[in-house]
Image: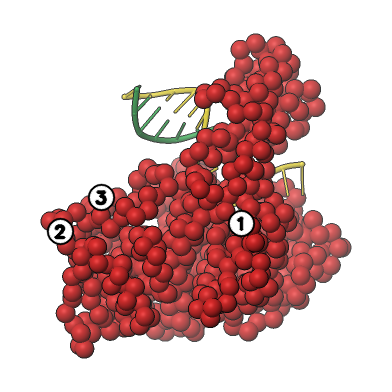
Chain colours: A red, B green, C yellow
Amino acid sequence: MYLLLAAHPDGAALQHLTPDGSPDPADPEPRVISAGELAGVVRGLEKHRPRWIWHRTQDWYPALLAAGVELERCYDLTLCGAILAHSEFTAHTAYAQTAEKRTQDDELQPPPRSLQPPSPPAEQGALFDAPRPGRAPRHTLEDLRADYAAQHEALSRAGTEAGTEPNRRQRLQLLLAAESAGAMIAAEMQHTGVPWREELHEQILADSLGPRPPFGHRPAKLEALTAELRQLLSSPSLNPDSPQELMRALHRNGIEVQSTRQWELKESSHPVIEPLLAFKKLSRLHTANGWAWLDAWVKDGRFQPEYVVGGVVSGRWASRGGGALQIPRQIRGAVHADPGHKLIVADASQLEPRVLVALAQDSRMAEAARDKDLYAGIAAQGFGGDRAKAKVALLGAIYGATTGESGRLMPQLARTYPRAVGYVEQAAREGEAGKTVTSRLGRSSPPPSGRWLQSQQSTTAEEQRRADSLARSRGRFTRNFVVQGSAADWAACWLAELRRRLRAMRADGTPAGELVFFLHDEVMVHCPDAAVADCVRAIEAAANAAKELLFGRIPVEFPVSVAVVDSYDQAK
DNA sequence: GCGTGGAGCGCG
DNA sequence: AAAGCGCGCTCCACGC
């Protein structure tokens, strides 16, 4: 059962569709539902386990969750449309070929929320207010129905051109399902929030910085360090937050750095370096995750950031507000399970190298990847047991290192693993040539910009050097894209499979945990004590299911490391 | 006074 | 230890 939901001047319009996007002959007429009735109607229809089709999950689902309505599955037209418009798997379809025009049309519309300034945590319950009565919605039911039908048609043609490898349509279909599930999970996690103990956070701040200072003042520890720096550098009015002032003061004292970055400062043994690095560390804590952050982002024991699914070209999520994907280790002790609960923190070990093994079908590297520690396996095979060397070499291959130790190790790596290295080298060459590359499930890299293409036409020697540098830069991007993008494919499937298992446990009446956080290759489940063992099994089973969905039954392990803890700082 | 881009640093 | 991918946030510097 497919149910299309669209904005309507009187609330919402709802239509039954067939899977290909035609009005369902059994019930073809749209019906209009008032804003006040919507949650109840949706809740009732959910009993039939429909797939909800809507313009953007973010437009509908947060308010439904606030009204206590959880749904099983959806189809997010914006996210899926963006994938289909750019995927190599559908590049031959009318949908992709008219995508450019649709994008231009959309740019005439007001910007989506993602381009507006960040808003403080959502006021829940005050939703369902768009569209305002009497105003025509920007996307009518018929617009959306036609878009869905066109997307369905494009998907059905994926992989139909001659000479392409098998299963393209199935893979792309999986990606669309995982992306839509991801949009629901993002809304659910924002709704639930990360359990955050404010008093623990405040204790960490007090221990590191001193008591909370009056607004606009430096905390005591930072004040003391500032005085010490001023004295050591004979610069009585120095503002150590200003890189320019700091650099001048360092130069005056014979410390000839080119920047004030940590790693460069560490080169010097001058007595000012230690307090300077301490200042930078504490200053960062105070400005980025100090009392102001706590006031702005943590409410009633929960941190509720907004996740931006599809916010990164590779398919990773981005976030908005509160720096949710950059919670520093320093304050992870404040992330603490409720009484009678645990946090299960699971991360996919060495995900990107394992994804590369699977993509490239490098059987020699697959032997190393049977080990729980892939780097150790690689070290044993070709780097004289030197794990650090093996790790630097492999990450260098994935990122495109050319200089330094990592660059020097590349030939050695390529001799041992010609297929794996060849795979990323090929992606780099495609990028340098201005082509796009594609993840395992069919998410393609953006085409080169007009300026990039222009630069490749350059004539003078100086311009040519610049163009070559830009080409190599794009090569590093596409090289990384195939791995990072396919890892994101895997992670999206892992998350969707885990959500399905947790929902099944809840439907059984078994106590189950809730997903509360996701970070590229890591998930956090907040879980009643009694459900821990079942949840851990669900996490592991979901990881294995994700591997098989992407790659079938291959002899490469994707192990997850699981920590059951009271607070986040206890995990790894 | 306001917006923007760079520097720097947090995360994977 | 270091320089190669993807992000967001904060501060400062600068131009209007």
Label 1 marks a residue whose chain is: A
Residue type (three-letter) at the residue carrying disc 3: Pro
Rendering quarter of residue A380: bottom right
Tell me the crowding category of disc 3: few under 14, some 14 to 19, or many 20 or more residues within 10 angstroms, Cα based: few
As displayed, is residue A154 above or below residue A314? below
- First along the sequence among labels 3 and 2: 3
Asked whether residue A373 appears in the rendered view, the answer is yes
Q: Are marks 2 and 1 in contact (CB under 8 Å)?
A: no
Q: Nearer the viewer, residue A113 or A377?
A: A113
Q: Are marks 3 and 1 in contact (CB under 8 Å)?
A: no
Q: Secondary structure at mark 3?
A: loop
Give the distance between the C-alpha atoms of the residues marked 2 and 1, in whole angstroms: 46 Å
Tell me the crowding category of disc 2: few under 14, some 14 to 19, or many 20 or more residues within 10 angstroms, Cα based: few
Q: Secondary structure at mark 1?
A: loop
Q: Quadrant of the N terminus of chain A?
A: bottom left
Q: Secondary structure at mark 2?
A: loop
Q: Residue at x 41, y 44 (%)?
A: A120
Residue with the mark numbered 3: A110
Q: Position of residue A342 (x, y in %)?
A: 66, 61
In this view, the mark in front (3 or 1) = 1
In this view, the mark in front (3 or 2) = 2
Q: Nearer the viewer, residue A324 or A418?
A: A324
Tell me the crowding category of disc 1: few under 14, some 14 to 19, or many 20 or more residues within 10 angstroms, Cα based: some
Residue type (three-letter) at the residue carrying disc 2: Ala
Rendering quarter of residue A45: bottom left
- First along the sequence among labels 2 and 1: 2
Q: Is residue A323 left or right of residue A410?
A: left
Q: How many marks?
A: 3
- First along the sequence among labels 3 and 1: 3
Instruction: Kindly identify which numbered label has been placed on residue A338.
Output: 1
Q: Nearer the viewer, residue A396 or A283?
A: A283
